[in-house]
Image: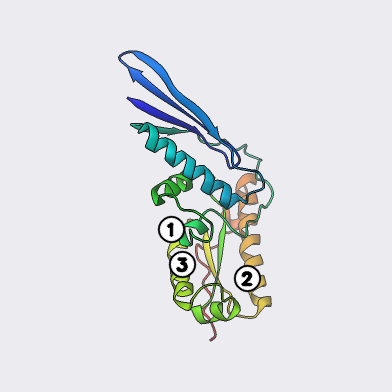
């Protein structure tokens, strides 16, 4: 039996291959993946996934063991914002320079710490295309549907209609964030849900267009 062990990290990922022969264990190979620090997060993840995929092809392990990250109870007592996240690679892997297998991307997603709150700024394809012409209209429509389908799978996913005036969009986003933080404080303080009712799973605001 051959086992590949991974110690994941966004800057350096270690790996080692161990093989059992009869009752003995042998170290087959070991190494690490350390993409250049100048690369963006998406580019580093792409490089790590590509090299780990090559390791798996080379050594053909029977099992893969991945070390889970440990987070202290107060490590995320503040609000951390991401404009982009790993989930974007599911929708548009080309933009994020990811060319590895989809199953490996899904595996990484299952193992990493998930966002506590995800807000999708949604708009009809025509509105999005009028604001940004980075891709053809058909691709804009495809990505929009992909994001809507993706956020349906998320426990704390919210959809806000971004086709409305900016002030209303900002107000709705602020409301979602504040209700989420209030609910988190209430849980940690033992105050109960009646002091800080959690936000509904989806906040969908219909477009006025």
Q: Secondary structure at mark 1?
A: loop
The residue at which mark 2 appears reads as 172
- The answer to the question of whether label 2 and label 1 lie on touching residues, with beta carbons closer than 8 A, is no
The residue at which mark 1 appears reads as 153
Ranked by sequence position, the earlier of labels 3 and 2 is 3
Crowdedness near tag 2: few (<14), some (14–19) or many (≥20) residues, C-alpha within 10 Å: some
Determine which quarter of the picture holds residue 181: bottom right
Determine which quarter of the picture holds residue 142: bottom left
Q: Nearer the viewer, residue 83 or 139?
A: 139
Q: Residue at x 35, y 26 (%)?
A: 2
Q: Position of residue 209 (x, y in %)?
A: 53, 86
The answer to whether residue 187 of the structure is visible from this angle is yes
Q: Secondary structure at mark 3?
A: helix
Relative to 31, residue 180 above or below: below
Q: CA distance from mark 1 to mark 3?
A: 9 Å
Ranked by sequence position, the earlier of labels 2 and 1 is 1
Q: CA distance from mark 3 to mark 2?
A: 18 Å
The answer to whether residue 198 of the structure is visible from this angle is no
The residue at which mark 3 appears reads as 148
Determine which quarter of the picture holds residue 24: top left
């Amino acid at each position: 039996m051959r086992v590949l062990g991974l110690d994941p990290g966004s800057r350096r990922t270690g790996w080692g291959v161990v093989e059992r022969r009869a009752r003995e264990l042998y170290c087959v190979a070991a190494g690490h993946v350390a993409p250049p620090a100048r690369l963006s997060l998406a580019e580093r993840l792409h490089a790590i996934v590509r090299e780990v995929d090559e390791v798996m092809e080379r050594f053909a392990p029977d099992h893969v063991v991945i070390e889970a990250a440990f987070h202290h109870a107060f490590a995320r007592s503040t609000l951390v914002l991401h404009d982009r996240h790993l989930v974007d690679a599911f929708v548009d892997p080309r933009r994020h320079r990811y060319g590895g297998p989809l199953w490996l991307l899904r595996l990484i997603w299952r193992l990493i710490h998930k966002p506590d709150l995800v807000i999708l700024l949604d708009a009809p394809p025509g509105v999005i295309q009028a604001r940004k012409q980075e891709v053809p209209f058909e691709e804009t429509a495809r990505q929009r549907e992909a994001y809507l389908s993706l956020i349906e799978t998320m426990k704390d996913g919210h959809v806000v209609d971004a086709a409305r005036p900016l002030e209303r969009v900002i107000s709705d986003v602020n409301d979602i964030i504040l209700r989420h933080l209030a609910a988190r404080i209430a849980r940690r303080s033992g105050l109960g849900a009646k002091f800080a009712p959690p936000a509904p799973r989806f906040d969908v605001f219909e477009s006025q267009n």
